[in-house]
Image (cartoon, coloured by chain):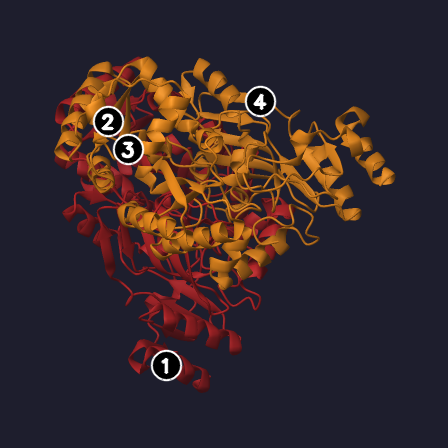
Chain colours: A orange, B red
Amino acid sequence: MADVAARFAGIVGVGNLLSGNEVGEDYAHDESLTCEPHKPAYVAKPGSAEEVAALLVAAAEHAVPVTARGSGSGLSGAARPREDGLLISFERMNAVLEIDTANQVAVVQPGVTLAQLDAETAVAGLAYTVYPGELSASVGGTVGTNAGGMRAVKYGVTRNNVVGLQAVLPTGEIIRTGGRTSKVATGYDLTQLIIGSEGTLALATEVIVKLYPRLPYGATLLAPFGDLDQVMQAVPPILASGLAPNILEYVDNLTMAAISYNEKLSLGVPDEVRDATQAYLVVGLENRDSDRLDGDVERAGELLSELGATDVYVLDGGSARKLIEAREKAFWTAKSVGADDVIDVVVPRSEMPAFLARVRELATAAEAGALGCGHAGDGNVHLGIFCKDPEKRYRLLRDIFADGMARGGAISGEHGIGQSRKQHFLELEDPAKVALMRRVKQAFDPTDILNPGVLFG
Amino acid sequence: MADVAARFAGIVGVGNLLSGNEVGEDYAHDESLTCEPHKPAYVAKPGSAEEVAALLVAAAEHAVPVTARGSGSGLSGAARPREDGLLISFERMNAVLEIDTANQVAVVQPGVTLAQLDAETAVAGLAYTVYPGELSASVGGTVGTNAGGMRAVKYGVTRNNVVGLQAVLPTGEIIRTGGRTSKVATGYDLTQLIIGSEGTLALATEVIVKLYPRLPYGATLLAPFGDLDQVMQAVPPILASGLAPNILEYVDNLTMAAISYNEKLSLGVPDEVRDATQAYLVVGLENRDSDRLDGDVERAGELLSELGATDVYVLDGGSARKLIEAREKAFWTAKSVGADDVIDVVVPRSEMPAFLARVRELATAAEAGALGCGHAGDGNVHLGIFCKDPEKRYRLLRDIFADGMARGGAISGEHGIGQSRKQHFLELEDPAKVALMRRVKQAFDPTDILNPGVLFG
């Protein structure tokens, strides 16, 4: 083991290699609520693609399994290392290499956080439009999980916004995929294959992301509804209206109460309205022109009333920001109130009412709780699960996942499979697809050193 | 051979299997200018995914190579069959199965043409926004090549607009990937891997495409520039403006003359302006509101003038439609004026001026012609190549492709590699990537029956 450590240290420098007791607790886990921490045998902090390549070659030679880590904010255990493994932490590869305004892309290293990228693109009047709840997330991590977030309803998820990669294959080769352009028709799309592969196929060492003009005017509408089904039924007409909301979220009344309490949020909703509300719709609008924004806000308000909202509140900037932040922190709220797990099933949005009704039935039958909020425009339902008994919880989740899949959805819309959903994934997914994915994995990683134990390993 | 034909006929029915002399000329080619026709030994016209699966199993058993064909409008020879092979024509699987307005998707069979889909979505006030030049193209074909087209500057290419597939693997399994939702984080994205794989990995038997609200108001601006570089330099500011054009094309003066002549186009550009023009920019704008469209047209006109346009013409509906159609038919124009090949290199859009300058140098040195137009917003340059001698032309294209790649681009933005670009692709692409693609191919198609000879076969 000392030999192996010396080999890794020789690659990244002694100061950038931790082993044994030097490895801190933070490297042992991500934010999954159900994966026990595993301290890795080694943590290496490479400074370049070449060092990453050399680490992978050395790891393969010594049969040391490798897990990549960005900020460790993932929710499915995909960045939890193996106890006998090497954790490659991208914390030193954290430079925004270029904001290319002519091509509207940024070239960044994987350790760059979304907050950092947001600040640097803002200076150029541009934005990287993937905003998962956690802005401390690293770009590399979001590539690994294909992160989504609220703005996906307008701008798509990570895979729609990454146009190129530099990546290191487990065989040690450094490749470049895609480029500073959205169109490429030269063989299999390796960029897309690596995105969402949860560190099992290749490690991204440079990411080219698409940027959009940062629109200067925005507004947030809050619409309480007496009935959860009505909220869900309001979603398709809003999207068909052409208003192109950049946020379209639902928050159920209990979750709204919890996040309001946790974040000391006061939204100006009178008590009698609040008490008659089963769920809220939050609609974000943006424009490059303030008059047009005003017109859109008016139209959206009318539309929401027509669709059954009890009232419509246009939030002032401060309240709006606080509400969005609070919604983004819903995971932390769920955690703080004792949720035993947090899931993010995705279904076609037309299926949300029936899916949520079925979830309530299943939870009641299991004497469990399932509360939440979600990306209504995308059919992506985030639920805090309150059910202490692990076996009962496993069965409840299986039933919820199976129901979502039967409706044409998937176990996860953005958190991924990682280690925490693997058993359910293998139980519920079409075996022909799992077998095919295993063969693809083998094509990339013949010695199976990249994140074995994740997805289907 | 009679045995094999009987086996195929048993699957699709005698009336849906052609062999020997029954096979018509049309099945022998696509629209590539350089691939000699090859009549296949068999043409099967399946009516269901199950029949496709049975055909692939039978083909694998008899070691008969299989090529899929939609409308045969591809430009790289990816649908040209093998002479000893089976051509699976999707002409009978041509139903729009569902226009799902709640989820804003359509579910279609692969043989549906884009024209047919456009007509059926229009009724619902929606649109499938992938418009490559040829609307007789089939949806299955566009999935195979990851077709782009003019609207890609706003809406992206096929891979950005297909959210799910039913596909038959060469091993005979029928799988479903993705769904009626844009977000899925459950393993490798098989949808994206199959899109653009040119019929080498799996055959799509059902395609779920994303629809957008069909915006009722549109305008087309035509801006002549005295200088080609200026046209190219105008592109980034237009895209940064937030006007979100749905068309942003350049047409060089000779190409404009040719398509105007061919299509009897009269655009109202005075002779003296036309004579001083090196290239034109065509800008399409659309809106759900006519006043907003007017405002955008005004702003775009100002911007184009600031950026050096000699003048700006807002075309009336009829002229605009004719110009766009003529631009879409540029391939046929190039063919009719005797182009020896048509290529579609993509480069980062900031590189277009330098790339086009280099192309001119290379063409002059080779005593050849290279004229064209292209998707300026995407850096996707379509060039008619006039060079009779095949060897000289091969070298010229190699030099053009290599220059495009050195600028961070690719050999093709939308036409694909197929059979016509394979030699260049293998000569110029990173061998590590080609080797990886071969391993992925092997993971899908262990007996190598799907379109061997395409891409890198």
Instruction: Check disc 4 and give the amino acid type.
Output: Leu
Residue receiving disc 4: A97
What's the distance in space between the residues labelled 4 and 2, CA to CA? 48 Å
Query: Do residues under tags 1 and 4 come within 8 Å of each other at their CB atoms?
Result: no
Residue B191 image position (x, y, % from top left):
43, 52
Q: Position of residue B132 (x, y in %)?
A: 32, 45
Between label 2 and label 3, give the one nearer the viewer: 2
Is B148 on the left or on the right of B296, as rendered? right
Q: Is residue A299 above or below residue A342?
A: above
Please give the label number shown on residue B43. Answer: none
Query: Which residue matches tag 3?
Result: B246
Q: Circle 3 — which element?
A: loop
Tell me the distance, in whole angstroms, between the alpha carbons under discs 1 and 4.
59 Å
Is residue B307 among what the camera can see? no
Residue B9 numbered tag: 1
Amino acid at dot 1: Ala
Mark with earlier residue (4, 2): 4
Image position of A365 with respect to B296: above or below: below
